Image (cartoon, grey):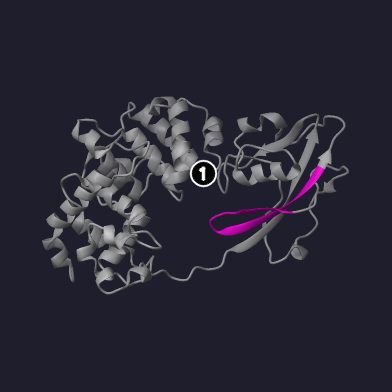
Amino acid sequence: MNSIAEITDKKPEFVDALLDWYDHNARTLPWRISPEAKRGGIKPDPYHVWLSEIMLQQTTVATVKSYFEKFMEKWPTLEKLAEADLDDVLTEWAGLGYYARARNLYKCARTIHDDLGGNFPKTNDELLKLPGIGVYTAAAISSIAYDIPETVVDGNVERVLSRLCQIETPLPDSRPEIRGHAEILTPDYRPGDYAQALMDLGATICTPKSPKCGSCPLQEDCLARKNDLVADLPRRKNKKEKETRRGYVFWAEYDGKVWLRRRPEKGLLGGMMEVPSDEWAPSNSWQNIPTPRIPIIANWKLLPGVVRHTFTHFHLELKVVKLQLEEMINLQEGEWCDIDKQDQYALPTVMKKVFNHVGQPLLDL
């Protein structure tokens, strides 16, 4: 495979080798219909495909499995999800991160239920009109759920094609070239299985470290293997070091209740509940963080230690100041919530860490 022309010439053999491997080695996943089941006439449920793809964005398969199963138990159909309460959805989502995905998931379910008669769209153009569905997700749904030949490129596919075609331009600059190869190789037959086969190959054989090249069905055509470059590809641009932000959270407690408030709908952790906090300011030292503005005039105490959490673009450190009240006070915002019912609130992982830091264990982080 030294050129696009040669890739095109070998496409049938390439696709057949990959699909044959997939038929014998497909991962068993709770949202997937196996090749054998598909041959028996069972079709993928677009609701399952869509839900799993949204969950899998920036999250590992191992993590998503249990979340998917919990969602299926609570909302087995799109109709049930559309009729749910957003807070319940956010609560079940807690721990998966990127909470805008959960809000868009809910909006999408409502749109399909209310405006499309509960029928999932099939084509890319229709799918791209829905909240939270981008180019990759639309292609994955069309391909996997409906066997429409669309080009599906995720991180696993990028790695496989970078090595197969020896693409030495660093990511993300190489993405247009990778997509060009991917579009040429996407078949008209069994496109859903083909897409899942490439993803499985990247997840189980063509792994980032210690790839199992001897077990790869595409090893004879892999340019990186021929030229001893597998360990070097895909290349990546050097990432900028994440900044650290710091701030304070205010734990006010009264008679088994804690003060919680909802974050703004837009922005980081939008719509989630939090222990009230001040601004999370970029800083290279706690010495540069000013004394916090206390939200309630009272005898607050600074707890020892720091709560640490990492988001996609920055590290976060929080110090906790605590107030033990003897009598109830009226809050200008937020509400008093039962500490022992914390699993009923849509708390993000960083706030679960705050609970644990204060000495109020939550569900597993």
Q: What amino acid is found at the position of numbered circle 1 in the picture?
A: Leu
Q: Is residue 318 left or right of residue 82?
A: right
Say which residue appears at 65% left-offset and 44% top-offset.
Answer: 351
Callout 1: helix, strand or loop? loop
Residue 132, picture quadrant: top left
Say which residue appears at 27% left-offset and 61% top-offset.
Answer: 214
Percent x, y of residue 124: 28, 44
Residue 110, picture quadrant: top left
Percent x, y of residue 55: 44, 42
Determine if the magenta segment contains residue 315: yes
Magenta part of the chain: 306-322
Extreme left residue here? 9
Extreme bottom residue here? 227
What quarter of the picture does the C terminus occupy? top right
Say which residue appears at 29% left-offset and 62% top-offset.
Answer: 213
Say which residue appears at 27% left-offset and 38% top-offset.
Answer: 34
- In the rendered image, the vertical position of residue 238 relative to residue 32, given as above or below: below
Q: Is residue 117 left or right of residue 360?
A: left
According to the picture, the residue beneath numbered tag 1 turns out to be 96
Viewer-nearest residue: 174 or 36: 36
Q: Is residue 316 left or right of residue 73?
A: right
Percent x, y of residue 301: 85, 47
Viewer-nearest residue: 303 or 295: 303
- In the rendered image, the vertical position of residue 140 relative to residue 6, given as above or below: above
Extreme front residue here? 214
Determine if the magenta segment contains residue 233: no
Q: Residues within 10 Å of mark 1 (few under 14, many from 20)?
A: many
The kind of secondary structure the magenta stretch mainly shows is strand
Viewer-nearest residue: 135 or 96: 96
Q: Is residue 177 visible?
A: no
Q: Is residue 287 visible?
A: yes
Percent x, y of residue 141: 30, 41
